[in-house]
Image: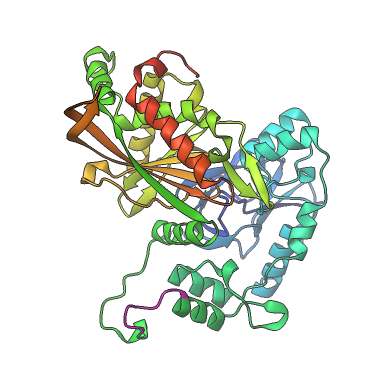
Amino acid sequence: MPIEIVVPRLGWSMDEGTFSEWLKKDGEQVNAGDMIFVLEGEKASQEIESFDSGILHLPADTPQPGDTVAVGQTLGYLLAEGEAIPARSNSSADSMTRSVSKLAGAKRVGGPAARRRARELGVDVSALQAADSETRATIDDRQRTETHPPTNALSRRIGSRVAVTPRARRKARELGVDWSSVSGSGRNGRIRERDVLAFAKHAQPDAAGADLSTALGTQQPASRIRRTIAQRMLAGVQQTAPVTLTTKVDATELVGLREQRKAESAWNGVPSYNDILVKLVAAALPECPELNACWRNNGVFTYDEINIAVAVDIEGGLVAPVIKNANSLLLDEIAKQSHSLAEQARTGTLSQNQLEGGTFTITNLGMFDIDFFTPIINLPQSAILGVGRIVREPVVRDNTVVPGDVLGLSLTFDHRAIDGATAAKWLQHLCKLIAQPSRHMTDAAK
């Protein structure tokens, strides 16, 4: 029976991507483990691995480089020797039907890492129960399936899926609207373009209440990364209950520690303040598991790992590559990874895997002389720490006012997952670590 080659989901919020190129030719033998095509996701391109073997067959309507493709869309087939080429209609309606059927079927599209690991363990990836609301199986799903039998959660989710027209989805992308928050006026609650327009006008009116379409100006088309950022930022506000706490901390010893590391560093990249804060945040998170978590299925899902995403400003947008298992790394190891990830981000060479798996995010605007700000939660995480500038200010030590270095911090958290007092207590604990950072730099984990 022909094996379909479908578009995988590269990110938790990805609905579509851009097809880049085939890495195998029509009629060429493909072996399990071969990279078969390149797909551009929300913020990175990735070579997609084949998990089956066969002879590649590309139908007449296979996408061309630069075409937009939907998650679950069939791109081609793998055939056995002598197997007949499957009949396939070129109509867009039939193509859409196949894509929907693929998503709704019992066999789920797993992420490359999850499917590779499942194959190593002899686990059927189609039986994995996803912990979140996406149809993509992850390594976390595989680990939970080893101890908990799968349920029919996927079929329940598909059964309750909100219908949305293509025009409505496209208009939502243009306006930066999360269409899943829109109430549909069509049959069975189907969301139409006019529903998105009404939602956008109600949610984002201009100051004078006028129709924005009548204002004079120049419309610039948004890049894919800009549209992705807009969608995720809007979702971070609409799909959470965000609260921000701000505080100041005496960072004199933090400044002293970095000056010391400048003198001692055995490599060219001296640890930055961000690197030190990654280490301290990773050391502090076990004190408050709700901050290293997400709101999922009407409950708090706590991550077993501490993976710190660090926001990096690049041309045209913002990305947040992830330092995995930061609590088990030494400061110099964090600094080297951070330096490498930032360089890859600016040169556009990050892989999708380097952007996934974050459990907590740090974003820094201190270089722009900002003291405090309101960072937006990086879904599906439950918290993000905003770092401001370090300034010389009077501080009180032993009842004496002396010059000191003061750092501004802004913690935004999802109030559904954690209470304000608990978050404030953790921020206070982090401030104590920042005030005396040296003791937390020698051991790999605290």
Residue 31 seen anywhere in this rendered image of the structure: no
Q: What residue is rendered at 72% in x and 40% in y?
A: 53
Q: Position of residue 254 (x, y in %)?
A: 29, 25
Q: Is residue 267 magenta?
A: no
Q: Residue at x 50, y 46 (%)?
A: 420
Q: Viewer-proximal residue, 408 or 182?
A: 408
Q: How is the image coloured?
A: rainbow
Q: Position of residue 150 (x, y in %)?
A: 81, 43
By secondary structure, the bulk of the magenta-drawn segment is best described as: loop
172, above or below 130, in the image: below
Can you give x and y, in whole percent of width and height, for residue 78 in the image? 71, 48
From the viewer's perspective, is 161 left or right of 262?
Answer: right
Residue furthest to the front: 399
Region rendered in magenta: 203-209
- How many marks can you see? 0
271 on left or right of 301? left
Residue 137 image-quadrant placement: top right
Whether residue 140 is visible: yes
Q: Residue at x 42, y 34 (%)?
A: 428
Name the one closer to the observer, 45 or 23.
45
Magenta region includes residue 208: yes
Q: Tell me if residue 411 comes above or below residue 274 in the rendering.
A: below
Tell me the quarter of the picture where residue 226 sits.
bottom left
Q: Position of residue 141 (x, y in %)?
A: 70, 40
